[in-house]
Image (spheres, rainbow, N blue to C red):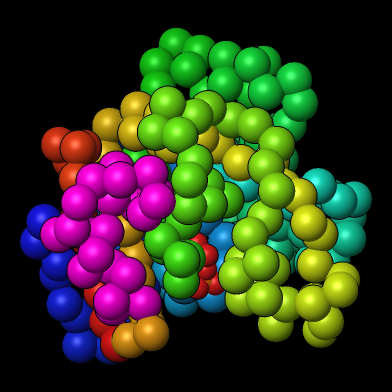
Amino acid sequence: MKINVLKSYDELSSTAADIVEKQLKKQPLSKLVLPTGSTPLGMYKELIKRELDWSHTVTFNLDEYLMNPDHPCSYHSFMRKNLFDRINIYPDHCHFPYRPTLSFEDKMYANKGIDLCILGIGSNGHIAFNEPGSSFKSRTRVVDLSEQTIQDNSRFFGSVDDVPKQAITMGLATIMESKRIVLMVNSVDKLNILNVAMDGEVTESVPASILQRHNNVEVYYCD
Ligand code: PGA
């Protein structure tokens, strides 16, 4: 798979923001899947600056920890702080995976499916919280986080012990049903796993490798 190499994090952020902007202008009633973490922060900043009309847009976040959604480190809080409170989206158009997961998935697929899914990749090759070994047939469900992910995400919590051990995540099959997928990667530390995922064997031990089977994926990388 082709990896588009960009010159800087700013370029990665504005390229992804351009894709979202075009989608919202072409189809105001779009359904988007959105990521959290460090990678998309620049894209969200850029989208806020552009003052787009989000009033018809519906979003679904990829995942959430099993924790109080009002906790400052929850992904609900992350999204409110970094995007939702600063654009004109309706709060009841913003969804996070919840139980019963079937009803969450029904909401995603009501009328039509996901138009655009923005993804990051974990240092172990996960997408959303689908850790290595996740079934390619997986759907939204509760998962145990891997030691690697707990370690990686401890930087947001201050201590490894404070990172929740479980989360609720869209599954790999759920993500693959998106019409278009954009994968953003912004660290040289992830170049190796990115190459393995994009050019290596398609295997459940590298969850992102499933993207090789999607016919509308773009990959953007900067170091
Ligand atoms: P990051 O995480 O953007 O914080 O590096 C990405 C991920 O784990 O999916």
Q: Residue at x 34, y 33 (%)?
A: 176
Q: Residue at x 36, y 54 (%)?
A: 206
107 vs 205, left or right, is right
Of the 4 image quadrants, the one containing the C terminus is bottom left
Spot occupied by residue 148 in the image (x, y as percentages of width and height):
60, 70
Determine the main secondary structure of the stretch shown in magenta.
helix
Spot occupied by residue 76 in the image (x, y as percentages of width and height):
74, 52
Above or below for 143 versus 87 = above
Whether residue 69 can be seen here: yes
Where residue 210 sits, quadrant-wise, is top left
Q: Residue at x 86, y 73 (%)?
A: 161
User: What residue span does the magenta drawing correspond to?
Assistant: 190-210
Where residue 95 sits, quadrant-wise, is top right
Q: Residue at x 61, y 76 (%)?
A: 152
Foreground pick, 177 / 24: 177
Where residue 164 sits, quadrant-wise, is bottom right
